[in-house]
Amino acid sequence: MNPTTDYFLIDDLLTDEHKMIRQTVRDFVDKEIIPIIDHYAQKHEPIPNLMKQLGAIGALGPYIPEEYGGAGLDQIAYGLIMQELERGDSAVRSAASVQSSLVMYPIYSFGSEAQKKKYLPQLASGEMIGCFGLTEPNHGSNPNGMETNIKDAGDHVILNGAKMWITNSPLADIAVVWAKDEEGVIRGVIVERNMPGFSTPKTDNKWSLRASATGELVFDNVKVPKENILPNIKGLKGPLSCLNSARYGISWGVIGAAVNCYEVALKYGLERTQFGRPIAGFQLQQKKLAEAITEITKAQLLCWRLGTLKNEDRATPSQISMAKRNNVDMAIHIARELRQVLGGMGIMGEFPMMRHAANLESVITYEGTHDVHLLITGNDITGINAFV
């Protein structure tokens, strides 16, 4: 019997530093997240003090240079961190992913030196919490249709509009918001919590990502100083490049959810006896387990190669899109199938399958739906845009 989730010895492709980083995050998740996650998911509440804990283990903006508070790690290290966090819960990975890829990444990539020094070290430590405002009530898969806007008012701009489905919004100290200027050009602005007219209504009654704080961003004539505009980017390329970074992290992260389901199902199958033998000895249960480890292995290889391309700055948005779609689909299928190995116990909070499956219903939708990512791949291979 070989119960390992590294079926193709992919660890041989990792450095000692990669494995040490992964173990550090795994230990954190085992000690601080797994024992409490069911409690907070059932109560529909975020884990207290989570961001500072993530900052303390270097999980926030790990690829940001050390001079700005990051760890200066490579993209495979970032992926492994996301994988281990999502092994605990998608809400934990979402919190780190938003902070890293959707807040720190655009400030580092497109911000002024003053903006980098002001915000990045505090974001890296978790002392400051950020969120990302792109999706609107009327514009999800079509971000170019955004209605949120800024108007020039001398030394500042006036921001109006609304964003929704925003992870961390009720907790956030700052928001990186994308809005159209008076020429219709998309610009990024950093909005601070204390700016009058800025509010963050909480989104309740979710069946998914219940341990994640989700809300709206509402801007009612908010005065934003012009020094808070990201100076080095214009157009939709700005938010889409952030999404590429986040989608990459998701493609790794969901492997962690699948691995957690697999490890629990395998252990349960070997321990639970029916008809005088462990249920793991029955053909249909072995089919589920064998298919799960096969799909996990394929996803691991896809992410390792994608991470290598990212490190070489050769990964394309279409490649990232494929990995995000494939791996989330893989993980949600595994969560549903392996829930059945546990029978009735599979619905209980003591086991992770139902929680992971419910969370992945959000992950398969956000940052590009499953169907939209199919069309991205279709456009790439045919040269024909099926969106319009």
Image (cartoon, grey):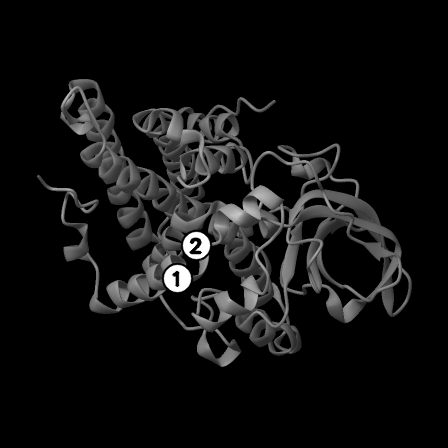
The three-letter amino acid code for the residue at tag 2 is: Pro
Give the camera-side residue of 163 and 210. Answer: 210
x, y (%) of residue 370?
Answer: 48, 29
Residue 158, by quadrant, is bottom right
Q: Which residue is at a point 75% across and 32% down the rendered structure image?
A: 138
| Mark number displayed over residue 31 | 1
Residue 274, by quadrant, is top left
Q: Label 1 near label 2: C-beta < 8 Å? A: yes
The three-letter amino acid code for the residue at tag 1 is: Lys
Q: Which residue is at a point 31% across and 61% down the rendered structure image?
A: 22
x, y (%) of residue 190?
Answer: 72, 63
Whether residue 234 can be seen here: no
Left or right: 298 as drawn, with respect to 129: left
Q: Secondary structure at mark 1?
A: helix
x, y (%) of residue 301?
Answer: 24, 43
Q: Which residue is mark 2?
A: 35
Label 1 neighbour load within 10 Å: few <14, some 14-19, many 20+: few
Q: CA distance from mark 2 to mark 1?
A: 7 Å
